[in-house]
Amino acid sequence: MMSSDTFPMIKPVTIGQGARQVRLDHPVILAPLSGVTDLPFRALVKAQGAGLVVSEMIASWAMVRENRNTLRMAEVVSAGGPNSVQLAGCDPEAMAEAAKIAVGLGADLIDINFGCPVKKVAIGQLAGSSLMRDEALAGRILEATVKAVDVPVTLKMRMGWDHNSLNAPNLARIAEQAGITMLTVHGRTRQQFYEGIANWDFIAEVKAATALPVIVNGDITSEYKAEEALRRSHADGVMIGRGAYGRPWFLQQVIDYLTTGQLTPAPSLEAQKEILLSHYQAIRAHFGEQAGVRLGRKHVAWYSQGLHSSAGFRAQVNRLDSGEAVEALIHQFYDPLIAQGFVRQDEMALAA
Protein backbone atom coordinates (compact mmCIF):
# COMPACT_ATOMS: atom_id res chain seq x y z
CA MET A 1 0.00 0.00 0.00
CA MET A 2 1.29 3.43 -0.95
CA SER A 3 1.45 6.44 1.33
CA SER A 4 -1.56 8.72 1.55
CA ASP A 5 0.14 11.54 -0.36
CA THR A 6 0.11 9.42 -3.54
CA PHE A 7 -3.70 9.57 -3.74
CA PRO A 8 -5.76 10.20 -5.75
CA MET A 9 -4.21 7.81 -8.28
CA ILE A 10 -6.88 8.43 -10.91
CA LYS A 11 -8.34 11.60 -12.36
CA PRO A 12 -11.12 12.25 -14.90
CA VAL A 13 -10.47 11.17 -18.48
CA THR A 14 -12.00 12.90 -21.50
CA ILE A 15 -12.51 10.68 -24.56
CA GLY A 16 -12.92 12.28 -27.95
CA GLN A 17 -13.61 15.86 -28.94
CA GLY A 18 -16.57 18.05 -29.74
CA ALA A 19 -20.22 17.68 -28.78
CA ARG A 20 -20.12 13.89 -28.45
CA GLN A 21 -17.01 13.65 -26.28
CA VAL A 22 -17.33 11.47 -23.19
CA ARG A 23 -15.95 12.31 -19.77
CA LEU A 24 -15.17 9.51 -17.33
CA ASP A 25 -15.10 11.07 -13.88
CA HIS A 26 -13.63 7.83 -12.52
CA PRO A 27 -11.86 5.66 -15.13
CA VAL A 28 -12.65 2.33 -13.47
CA ILE A 29 -14.34 0.32 -16.20
CA LEU A 30 -16.29 -2.93 -16.38
CA ALA A 31 -14.69 -5.16 -19.02
CA PRO A 32 -16.66 -6.69 -21.89
CA LEU A 33 -17.25 -10.29 -20.81
CA SER A 34 -18.95 -12.79 -23.08
CA GLY A 35 -22.01 -14.27 -21.39
CA VAL A 36 -21.60 -11.98 -18.37
CA THR A 37 -21.92 -8.29 -19.22
CA ASP A 38 -25.48 -8.51 -20.47
CA LEU A 39 -27.85 -5.62 -19.86
CA PRO A 40 -28.97 -6.69 -16.33
CA PHE A 41 -25.37 -7.02 -15.11
CA ARG A 42 -24.22 -3.77 -16.73
CA ALA A 43 -27.19 -1.89 -15.26
CA LEU A 44 -26.40 -3.25 -11.81
CA VAL A 45 -22.66 -2.51 -11.95
CA LYS A 46 -23.37 0.98 -13.24
CA ALA A 47 -25.91 1.58 -10.46
CA GLN A 48 -23.27 0.44 -7.95
CA GLY A 49 -20.88 3.15 -9.18
CA ALA A 50 -18.75 1.99 -12.14
CA GLY A 51 -17.16 4.71 -14.23
CA LEU A 52 -18.10 2.98 -17.50
CA VAL A 53 -19.63 -0.34 -18.53
CA VAL A 54 -18.94 -2.15 -21.82
CA SER A 55 -21.24 -4.61 -23.58
CA GLU A 56 -20.39 -8.16 -24.44
CA MET A 57 -18.37 -8.49 -27.63
CA ILE A 58 -20.78 -8.33 -30.58
CA ALA A 59 -20.02 -9.75 -34.03
CA SER A 60 -20.30 -6.99 -36.61
CA TRP A 61 -21.80 -9.25 -39.25
CA ALA A 62 -24.57 -10.31 -36.86
CA MET A 63 -25.27 -6.68 -36.02
CA VAL A 64 -25.52 -5.75 -39.70
CA ARG A 65 -27.97 -8.62 -40.28
CA GLU A 66 -29.95 -7.22 -37.34
CA ASN A 67 -30.04 -10.55 -35.58
CA ARG A 68 -32.59 -10.24 -32.79
CA ASN A 69 -30.35 -11.63 -30.05
CA THR A 70 -27.45 -9.48 -31.23
CA LEU A 71 -29.50 -6.30 -31.09
CA ARG A 72 -30.55 -7.23 -27.56
CA MET A 73 -26.87 -7.56 -26.60
CA ALA A 74 -26.33 -4.00 -27.80
CA GLU A 75 -29.06 -2.47 -25.63
CA VAL A 76 -27.68 0.24 -23.37
CA VAL A 77 -28.36 1.18 -19.77
CA SER A 78 -30.70 4.15 -19.84
CA ALA A 79 -29.30 6.05 -16.84
CA GLY A 80 -26.14 6.62 -14.85
CA GLY A 81 -23.54 7.79 -17.33
CA PRO A 82 -22.02 6.61 -20.62
CA ASN A 83 -22.38 3.21 -22.30
CA SER A 84 -19.91 1.48 -24.60
CA VAL A 85 -20.76 -1.21 -27.16
CA GLN A 86 -17.91 -3.48 -28.23
CA LEU A 87 -17.73 -4.78 -31.79
CA ALA A 88 -15.59 -7.46 -33.39
CA GLY A 89 -14.99 -8.32 -37.01
CA CYS A 90 -12.45 -8.39 -39.81
CA ASP A 91 -14.27 -6.44 -42.53
CA PRO A 92 -13.95 -2.64 -42.38
CA GLU A 93 -17.29 -1.98 -44.10
CA ALA A 94 -19.21 -4.34 -41.80
CA MET A 95 -17.55 -2.84 -38.74
CA ALA A 96 -18.47 0.66 -39.90
CA GLU A 97 -22.09 -0.30 -40.54
CA ALA A 98 -22.36 -2.14 -37.22
CA ALA A 99 -21.00 0.91 -35.42
CA LYS A 100 -23.70 3.09 -36.98
CA ILE A 101 -26.38 0.67 -35.80
CA ALA A 102 -24.95 0.58 -32.27
CA VAL A 103 -24.91 4.38 -32.08
CA GLY A 104 -28.50 4.38 -33.29
CA LEU A 105 -29.34 2.09 -30.37
CA GLY A 106 -27.84 4.57 -27.90
CA ALA A 107 -24.13 3.76 -27.61
CA ASP A 108 -22.04 6.71 -26.37
CA LEU A 109 -18.81 4.93 -27.30
CA ILE A 110 -17.84 2.22 -29.76
CA ASP A 111 -15.08 -0.14 -28.62
CA ILE A 112 -13.23 -2.33 -31.13
CA ASN A 113 -12.04 -5.76 -30.06
CA PHE A 114 -8.49 -6.73 -31.03
CA GLY A 115 -8.08 -8.87 -27.94
CA CYS A 116 -10.42 -11.88 -27.95
CA PRO A 117 -8.27 -15.03 -27.85
CA VAL A 118 -11.04 -17.59 -28.41
CA LYS A 119 -10.29 -19.93 -31.31
CA LYS A 120 -13.70 -19.44 -32.94
CA VAL A 121 -13.06 -15.68 -33.15
CA ALA A 122 -9.28 -15.38 -33.54
CA ILE A 123 -8.83 -18.34 -35.90
CA GLY A 124 -12.24 -19.11 -37.35
CA GLN A 125 -13.30 -15.51 -38.00
CA LEU A 126 -9.84 -13.89 -38.20
CA ALA A 127 -11.11 -11.25 -35.80
CA GLY A 128 -10.30 -10.29 -32.20
CA SER A 129 -6.65 -10.84 -31.37
CA SER A 130 -5.94 -12.18 -34.87
CA LEU A 131 -5.95 -8.60 -36.11
CA MET A 132 -2.81 -7.88 -34.12
CA ARG A 133 -1.04 -10.01 -36.75
CA ASP A 134 -2.24 -7.83 -39.64
CA GLU A 135 -1.50 -4.21 -38.81
CA ALA A 136 -2.53 -2.96 -42.25
CA LEU A 137 -6.01 -4.50 -42.00
CA ALA A 138 -6.24 -3.41 -38.37
CA GLY A 139 -5.59 0.17 -39.44
CA ARG A 140 -8.28 0.03 -42.14
CA ILE A 141 -10.83 -1.30 -39.65
CA LEU A 142 -10.01 1.44 -37.17
CA GLU A 143 -10.19 4.19 -39.77
CA ALA A 144 -13.48 2.95 -41.27
CA THR A 145 -15.15 2.71 -37.88
CA VAL A 146 -13.97 6.13 -36.74
CA LYS A 147 -15.22 7.75 -39.96
CA ALA A 148 -18.60 6.02 -39.73
CA VAL A 149 -19.79 7.48 -36.42
CA ASP A 150 -19.78 10.77 -34.55
CA VAL A 151 -19.08 9.23 -31.15
CA PRO A 152 -15.62 8.38 -29.79
CA VAL A 153 -14.16 5.03 -30.83
CA THR A 154 -11.86 3.12 -28.49
CA LEU A 155 -9.74 0.00 -28.86
CA LYS A 156 -9.10 -3.00 -26.63
CA MET A 157 -6.12 -5.23 -27.42
CA ARG A 158 -3.50 -7.52 -25.93
CA MET A 159 0.28 -7.22 -25.81
CA GLY A 160 0.50 -9.10 -29.11
CA TRP A 161 -0.25 -12.45 -30.69
CA ASP A 162 2.64 -14.13 -28.84
CA HIS A 163 5.84 -13.16 -27.07
CA ASN A 164 7.69 -13.02 -30.40
CA SER A 165 5.39 -10.28 -31.65
CA LEU A 166 4.68 -7.82 -28.84
CA ASN A 167 3.42 -5.10 -31.17
CA ALA A 168 0.87 -3.34 -28.96
CA PRO A 169 3.01 -0.15 -28.83
CA ASN A 170 3.07 0.04 -32.62
CA LEU A 171 -0.65 -0.66 -32.87
CA ALA A 172 -1.20 2.12 -30.36
CA ARG A 173 0.50 4.54 -32.74
CA ILE A 174 -1.57 3.23 -35.66
CA ALA A 175 -4.74 3.58 -33.59
CA GLU A 176 -3.93 7.15 -32.59
CA GLN A 177 -3.31 8.11 -36.21
CA ALA A 178 -6.63 6.49 -37.21
CA GLY A 179 -8.57 8.60 -34.73
CA ILE A 180 -9.01 6.14 -31.87
CA THR A 181 -9.55 8.04 -28.61
CA MET A 182 -8.61 5.56 -25.84
CA LEU A 183 -6.77 2.26 -25.54
CA THR A 184 -7.24 -0.65 -23.18
CA VAL A 185 -4.46 -3.23 -22.99
CA HIS A 186 -4.79 -6.67 -21.44
CA GLY A 187 -1.38 -7.65 -20.13
CA ARG A 188 -1.24 -11.04 -21.86
CA THR A 189 -0.65 -12.29 -25.40
CA ARG A 190 -3.27 -14.16 -27.36
CA GLN A 191 -1.35 -17.41 -26.94
CA GLN A 192 -1.53 -17.05 -23.17
CA PHE A 193 -5.33 -16.84 -23.23
CA TYR A 194 -6.00 -16.23 -19.51
CA GLU A 195 -3.10 -18.28 -18.16
CA GLY A 196 -0.05 -16.96 -16.35
CA ILE A 197 0.19 -13.51 -14.83
CA ALA A 198 -0.78 -10.26 -16.53
CA ASN A 199 2.27 -8.16 -17.40
CA TRP A 200 1.38 -4.66 -16.20
CA ASP A 201 4.94 -3.43 -16.76
CA PHE A 202 4.68 -3.98 -20.51
CA ILE A 203 1.64 -1.73 -20.69
CA ALA A 204 3.93 1.15 -19.68
CA GLU A 205 5.57 0.72 -23.09
CA VAL A 206 2.18 1.22 -24.75
CA LYS A 207 1.56 4.29 -22.60
CA ALA A 208 4.92 5.72 -23.67
CA ALA A 209 4.10 5.14 -27.35
CA THR A 210 0.95 7.29 -27.49
CA ALA A 211 -0.65 10.43 -26.15
CA LEU A 212 -3.99 8.61 -25.82
CA PRO A 213 -5.47 7.63 -22.45
CA VAL A 214 -4.49 4.03 -21.67
CA ILE A 215 -6.41 1.62 -19.46
CA VAL A 216 -4.70 -1.37 -17.81
CA ASN A 217 -6.54 -4.71 -17.78
CA GLY A 218 -5.83 -8.17 -16.41
CA ASP A 219 -5.78 -9.76 -12.94
CA ILE A 220 -7.25 -6.75 -11.12
CA THR A 221 -9.14 -8.57 -8.38
CA SER A 222 -8.45 -6.39 -5.34
CA GLU A 223 -7.99 -2.74 -4.49
CA TYR A 224 -4.28 -3.28 -3.89
CA LYS A 225 -3.86 -4.97 -7.29
CA ALA A 226 -5.60 -2.01 -8.93
CA GLU A 227 -3.09 0.28 -7.24
CA GLU A 228 -0.12 -1.84 -8.30
CA ALA A 229 -1.40 -2.16 -11.87
CA LEU A 230 -1.65 1.63 -12.17
CA ARG A 231 1.76 2.19 -10.61
CA ARG A 232 3.53 -0.30 -12.87
CA SER A 233 1.69 0.49 -16.10
CA HIS A 234 1.50 4.30 -15.71
CA ALA A 235 -2.01 3.91 -17.11
CA ASP A 236 -4.85 6.38 -16.70
CA GLY A 237 -7.38 3.90 -15.36
CA VAL A 238 -8.20 0.26 -14.82
CA MET A 239 -10.56 -2.23 -16.44
CA ILE A 240 -12.00 -4.98 -14.25
CA GLY A 241 -13.38 -8.27 -15.51
CA ARG A 242 -13.43 -11.40 -13.40
CA GLY A 243 -12.89 -9.36 -10.24
CA ALA A 244 -16.50 -8.18 -10.56
CA TYR A 245 -18.01 -11.69 -10.67
CA GLY A 246 -20.48 -11.84 -7.79
CA ARG A 247 -19.26 -8.39 -6.63
CA PRO A 248 -21.01 -5.73 -8.70
CA TRP A 249 -20.04 -3.21 -6.00
CA PHE A 250 -16.32 -3.93 -6.42
CA LEU A 251 -15.70 -1.21 -9.01
CA GLN A 252 -16.97 1.42 -6.60
CA GLN A 253 -14.67 0.02 -3.91
CA VAL A 254 -11.76 0.39 -6.34
CA ILE A 255 -12.80 3.96 -7.14
CA ASP A 256 -12.96 4.78 -3.44
CA TYR A 257 -9.53 3.30 -2.78
CA LEU A 258 -7.77 4.85 -5.78
CA THR A 259 -9.28 8.21 -4.88
CA THR A 260 -8.71 8.28 -1.13
CA GLY A 261 -6.36 5.43 -0.25
CA GLN A 262 -8.99 4.07 2.12
CA LEU A 263 -10.69 0.67 1.85
CA THR A 264 -14.47 0.76 1.67
CA PRO A 265 -16.27 -2.21 3.25
CA ALA A 266 -18.40 -4.38 0.99
CA PRO A 267 -22.15 -4.22 1.55
CA SER A 268 -23.44 -6.21 4.50
CA LEU A 269 -24.39 -9.81 3.77
CA GLU A 270 -28.03 -8.80 4.09
CA ALA A 271 -27.53 -6.09 1.46
CA GLN A 272 -25.68 -8.55 -0.76
CA LYS A 273 -28.63 -10.91 -0.60
CA GLU A 274 -30.97 -8.13 -1.70
CA ILE A 275 -28.62 -7.19 -4.56
CA LEU A 276 -28.49 -10.83 -5.65
CA LEU A 277 -32.28 -11.16 -5.58
CA SER A 278 -32.74 -7.96 -7.57
CA HIS A 279 -30.14 -9.09 -10.10
CA TYR A 280 -31.70 -12.53 -10.40
CA GLN A 281 -35.13 -11.06 -11.00
CA ALA A 282 -33.74 -8.68 -13.63
CA ILE A 283 -32.11 -11.59 -15.48
CA ARG A 284 -35.41 -13.49 -15.60
CA ALA A 285 -37.32 -10.40 -16.72
CA HIS A 286 -34.80 -9.68 -19.49
CA PHE A 287 -34.28 -13.17 -20.88
CA GLY A 288 -37.55 -14.87 -19.93
CA GLU A 289 -38.14 -17.43 -17.23
CA GLN A 290 -36.56 -20.52 -18.77
CA ALA A 291 -33.42 -18.87 -20.11
CA GLY A 292 -33.19 -16.55 -17.10
CA VAL A 293 -33.15 -19.40 -14.60
CA ARG A 294 -30.40 -21.11 -16.58
CA LEU A 295 -28.31 -17.97 -17.10
CA GLY A 296 -28.77 -16.84 -13.51
CA ARG A 297 -27.12 -19.94 -12.05
CA LYS A 298 -23.56 -18.74 -12.59
CA HIS A 299 -24.31 -15.40 -10.95
CA VAL A 300 -25.88 -17.05 -7.92
CA ALA A 301 -22.76 -19.21 -7.67
CA TRP A 302 -20.43 -16.20 -7.82
CA TYR A 303 -22.34 -14.25 -5.18
CA SER A 304 -22.20 -17.18 -2.77
CA GLN A 305 -18.49 -18.00 -3.14
CA GLY A 306 -16.65 -17.69 0.16
CA LEU A 307 -19.74 -18.35 2.26
CA HIS A 308 -20.12 -21.30 4.62
CA SER A 309 -21.60 -24.42 2.93
CA SER A 310 -21.95 -22.59 -0.39
CA ALA A 311 -20.95 -25.62 -2.49
CA GLY A 312 -24.06 -27.49 -1.42
CA PHE A 313 -26.19 -24.41 -2.02
CA ARG A 314 -24.86 -24.06 -5.56
CA ALA A 315 -25.52 -27.72 -6.29
CA GLN A 316 -29.13 -27.29 -5.22
CA VAL A 317 -29.57 -24.15 -7.33
CA ASN A 318 -28.26 -25.97 -10.40
CA ARG A 319 -30.96 -28.63 -10.03
CA LEU A 320 -33.87 -26.18 -9.90
CA ASP A 321 -35.88 -25.06 -12.94
CA SER A 322 -38.16 -22.60 -11.15
CA GLY A 323 -37.07 -19.04 -10.49
CA GLU A 324 -39.37 -18.78 -7.49
CA ALA A 325 -37.86 -21.96 -6.04
CA VAL A 326 -34.35 -20.52 -6.49
CA GLU A 327 -35.37 -17.30 -4.73
CA ALA A 328 -36.82 -19.29 -1.84
CA LEU A 329 -33.55 -21.22 -1.61
CA ILE A 330 -31.55 -17.98 -1.59
CA HIS A 331 -33.52 -16.79 1.44
CA GLN A 332 -33.09 -20.19 3.08
CA PHE A 333 -29.33 -20.14 2.54
CA TYR A 334 -28.54 -16.51 3.35
CA ASP A 335 -30.84 -15.78 6.29
CA PRO A 336 -29.13 -18.05 8.87
CA LEU A 337 -25.71 -16.74 7.83
CA ILE A 338 -26.91 -13.16 8.18
CA ALA A 339 -28.31 -13.93 11.63
CA GLN A 340 -24.96 -15.45 12.68
CA GLY A 341 -22.89 -12.54 11.35
CA PHE A 342 -20.97 -14.40 8.63
CA VAL A 343 -19.01 -12.49 5.97
CA ARG A 344 -17.59 -13.72 2.69
CA GLN A 345 -14.07 -15.08 2.98
CA ASP A 346 -12.80 -13.11 0.00
CA GLU A 347 -13.77 -9.87 1.73
CA MET A 348 -11.89 -10.83 4.89
CA ALA A 349 -8.81 -11.54 2.76
CA LEU A 350 -9.05 -8.18 1.00
CA ALA A 351 -9.38 -6.31 4.26
CA ALA A 352 -6.42 -8.07 5.85
Image (cartoon, rainbow, N blue to C red):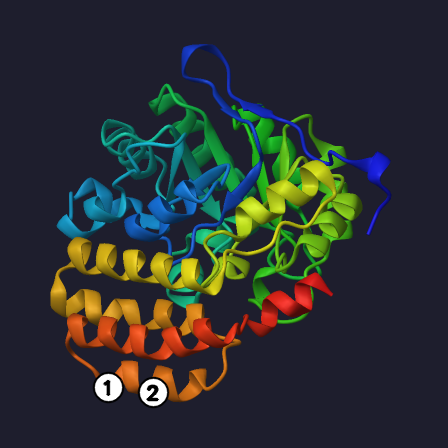
Q: Which mark is residue 340?
A: none
**Residue nearest the viewer, comparing 237 with 304:** 304
Q: Secondary structure at mark 2?
A: helix
Q: Is residue 331 left or right of residue 159?
A: left
Residue 298 x %, y %: 35, 71
Residue 189 x %, y %: 62, 60
Q: Which amino acid type is marked by label 1?
A: Arg
Q: Badge 2 local density, few (<14 within 10 Å), some, or many (20+)?
A: few
Would residue 134 be visible to someone looking at this image? Answer: no
Residue 174 x %, y %: 59, 32
Q: Badge 1 local density, few (<14 within 10 Å), some, or many (20+)?
A: few
Can you tell which quarter of the image residue 177 is in?
A: top right
Residue 32 x %, y %: 43, 50
**Label 2 belongs to which residue?**
315
**Residue nearest the viewer, comparing 119 with 78:** 78
Q: Residue at x 50, y 56 (%)?
A: 267
**Residue nearest the viewer, comparing 314 with 30:** 314
Determine contact: label 1, label 2, CB under 8 Å. yes
**Label 1 belongs to which residue?**
319
Q: Is residue 59 above or below residue 153?
A: below
Kindly report the distance in space between the C-alpha atoms of the residues bearing marks 1 and 2: 7 Å
Q: Residue at x 48, y 50 (%)?
A: 31
* Outermost residue toward the front in this view: 339
Q: Which amino acid type is marked by label 2?
A: Ala
Q: Is residue 109 above or below residue 19?
A: below
Q: Is residue 86 above or below residue 23?
A: below
Q: Residue at x 84, y 47 (%)?
A: 2
- Number of numbered discs present? 2
Identify the image quadrant of the C terminus.
bottom right
Q: Is residue 86 above or below residue 38?
A: above
Would residue 339 be visible to someone looking at this image? Answer: yes
Q: Secondary structure at mark 1?
A: helix
